[in-house]
Image: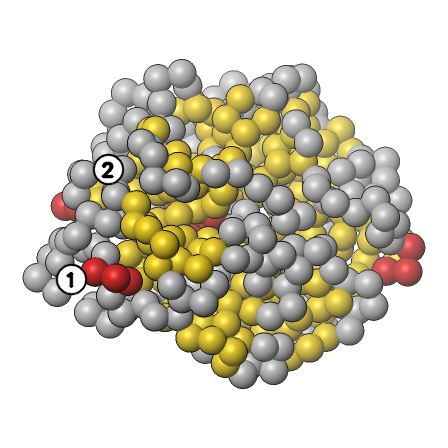
Amino acid sequence: MKHVVTQGAVWRAGLGIFASASLLLAGCSSSSNSTAAQSSPGSPATSATKSAPTTAPAAKPAVAQGAEHGIGDVPWDQVGPGWMLAVWTPVTPHRPGNQPPPGDPTPETATDVLYLVSPAGDRYSITDFPAGTGEPNIADWSGDGSHALLTPEYATHGDAISLDLHTGARTTIPNQGTLKYTLPTGKALLSSTSYNGNKPGTLKRIDMAGNDQFVYPTKDLGGAGQFSGDYIESPDGTQLVLGTANLGNEIVHRTDNSLVVMTNDGSIVRTLPAPMPKAMCSPVKWWAPEVILTHCNGEKGAGEQLWEVPFNGGKPTALTAVNTHENAPGFQGNYGNWNAFQVAGGTFLPTAGACGTTFVSRLTPDGHTERVKMPGVSDSAGLAGVSGDKLVVVGQVGCGGGNSLVTYDPAANTSTVLLGPPITKGGGVKSVRLYPSKK
């Protein structure tokens, strides 16, 4: 059976989010017999599965010595690249059918906490989300670092909250799409919807009250095709790169112009040909100042591939080989890569495994992937981004319990827990976002 990473999941993962609720974890080994959901808003997936036998690293993860502080103690002059926002819940997940011990927090009684976490592990409690107020997902972090956008977990639309990280003040935003802050400072929002059959996706700029400021023309994109719903914005906020649906079927015909560069006033600058033949391609993020990391899905199961696409229309370069999700040599157990991160130790990719699990892979010189074993961290773990030369992952540490926020140093092969067990006696980390990249 083939496993397919959807375009919507690709787009959300490209934002650097790892979000998970109701993680059903099995087993008590740090390196096997554990599962986690490949998580992104709108696509929950949980399943208990037994991993293939592996040899666990002897080393155990270290625990950060950082202290816990309040919102008034945040050293804002130090907050920047490498810092993290994370939602922690006191609810400890259990196997299906197992009831929590009497008195333990449940989703109906628990209060979730949004933390700001430094690379060294200092934790700053920003605000609480009491039971009944919705399970928050960190949808975005404003380019100036001052606000966080929180949306209902597993929801594609509904009221969102723009949270002032300095004061904790909340602004409720009515919405019927997927929201992101505008760049560079987040004074407004971009609201998008994905294509549906022959109905193009939509994109508009709205103010903090949800009122339309500008509606982008997305029906035909200058002959390149209808808007898919996937896009990225330039760091200065003056241009956007939009993906086209480009399905190549009887409903939506193929044009092979899968990326369209548009100015902030809706004018089309250029179209960029699809780097992969007969494929639907989506912009993921800025890989370099003038290079777009792009994910392509070939039609009729032809496979997927990550590409580096020059913003000026130059010749693209393949980052990964074509993965047909058939356990071909070099992609064993790999059912999809939708993002990539570079550190001194190499290029690393979040990877879809079997039955809804995720794990971390390292890119090999020939464009294939190999699974990364992190000391003390479960086989199923999500890659959220990078902090300096360390990977930021979310996974189970030790025996039972919820997920932890962990940094992993590929060069030293060491792991450090920043939030969650064993720092906390129970509960786990549900949603993580890294400080916005300036690329």
Which amino acid type corresponds to the residue marked 1 in the rendered image? Answer: Val
Spatial CA span between label 2 and label 1 = 18 Å
Mark 1 Cα shell of 10 Å, populated few (<14), some (14-19), many (≥20): some
What residue is at 78 percent from the left and 73 percent from the top?
169
Rendered location of residue 202, percent (x, y): 36, 70
Residue 313's tag is: none
Residue 252's tag is: 1
Location of residue 357 by image quarter: top left
Mark 2 Cα shell of 10 Å, populated few (<14), some (14-19), many (≥20): many
Which amino acid type corresponds to the residue marked 2 in the rendered image? Answer: Met
Q: In this view, does 354 lie to the left or right of 108?
A: left
What residue is at 38 percent from the left and 29 percent from the top?
319
Rendered location of residue 86, percent (x, y): 68, 53
Of 125 and 357, which appears nearest the observer?
125
Where is 174 relative to 47, above or below?
A: below
Q: How many marks?
A: 2
Q: Can you see residue 361?
A: yes
Q: Name the quarter where the N terminus is drawn.
A: top left
Rendered location of residue 58, percent (x, y): 64, 17
Q: Name the quarter where the C terminus is drawn.
A: top right
What residue is at 76 percent from the left and 38 percent from the top?
119
Residue 276's tag is: 2
Q: In this view, does 361 lie to the left or right of 249?
A: right
